Amino acid sequence: MLLTIDVGNSNTVLGLFEGQVMAEKWRIATDPLRTADELAVVLQGLLAQYPEPGGAEVTGISLCSTVPNVLQQVRQLCNRYFADVPTVIVEPGVKTGVPIKYDNPREVGADRIMNTLAAHEVYGGPAIVVDFGTSTNFDVVSDKGEFLGGALAPGIDISVDALAGRAAQLLKVELRKPRSVVGKSTVEALQSGILYGFVGLVDGIVARMIAELGLRKDDVTVIATGGLAPVVVAESRTITVHDPWLTLVGLRLVWERNVGSEQHDI
């Protein structure tokens, strides 16, 4: 089975693929202090949960990371505990098939490239991927599968943390839809401002991107992904698809382009 690992600033998302089918997925906290051996214990515990005798047998690994010090530990994990397993790490030199139309392509995070690859492969183009993570990333995909650029905005969680940390009478609240836009309590007022504020941010940026591309709204697939996407998806007027595991699909695709699908069970 192919193990895919997406190391983000806040969460690490893992998926197991049998061929093109995702058989299992997990989300754990990203801890920069966690060592390779500690990561191995967590990973082995997750793999043991797979409903087959002896757990899941990993025959390939595909991973990307936006956290350099965690990537170092994941490399050690692969070298020590999966030494005989073919591994693809998305970094310069790896074939992705994604032309990057950026002033400095090396500035583009590997997760954004994976989102572009998966978006074009699964949904076609043009498309816009909105990834709700530590930051809110907007990635524009051309009809040819090119990464055209995008926008980076503060993430929902860090915005809430900053507000609670800087305002003495405000607190961190659960991210959920309030009874009305006009909040009747401090909690509801915060929930309204956070939810509808980010909905407005997403819809506003997406609309401007579509206009700048000279396209119509119906011509562009807008894909929401990331751990915090469900909070916004239901209220957005521009998001058309919710695909929470898009990055993992990209990691499967890049594995097949570099090692080949014949290297793991199909």
Image (cartoon, rainbow, N blue to C red):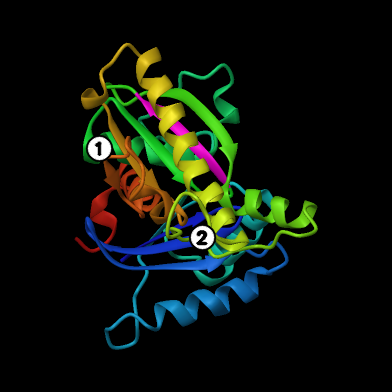
Secondary-structure class at tag 2: loop
Is 164 left or right of 105, judged from the image as shown? right
Q: In this view, does 201 lie above or below 27?
A: above
Q: Is residue 178 left or right of residue 135?
A: left
Q: Which amino acid does label 2 sit on?
A: Leu
Regarding residue 87, the answer to whether it shows in the image is no
Is residue 178 inside the magenta stretch?
no
Residue 247 x/y as whole percent: 40, 48
Q: Give x and y (percent) for residue 89.
A: 50, 48
Horizontally, residue 32 falls left or right of residue 250, namely right
Magenta residues span 135-141
| Point 55% across, 47% down: residue | 193
Quadrant housing residue 17: bottom left
Mark 2 vs mark 1, CA separation in Å? 32 Å
Residue sitting at x 51%, y 65%: 83
Q: Which residue lies furthest to the bottom in this view?
A: 53
Image quarter hosting the N terminus: bottom left
If the image is split into quadrants, where does the C terminus sit?
Answer: bottom left
Closer to the chain start, of discs 2 and 1, is: 1
* Chief SS of the magenta region: strand
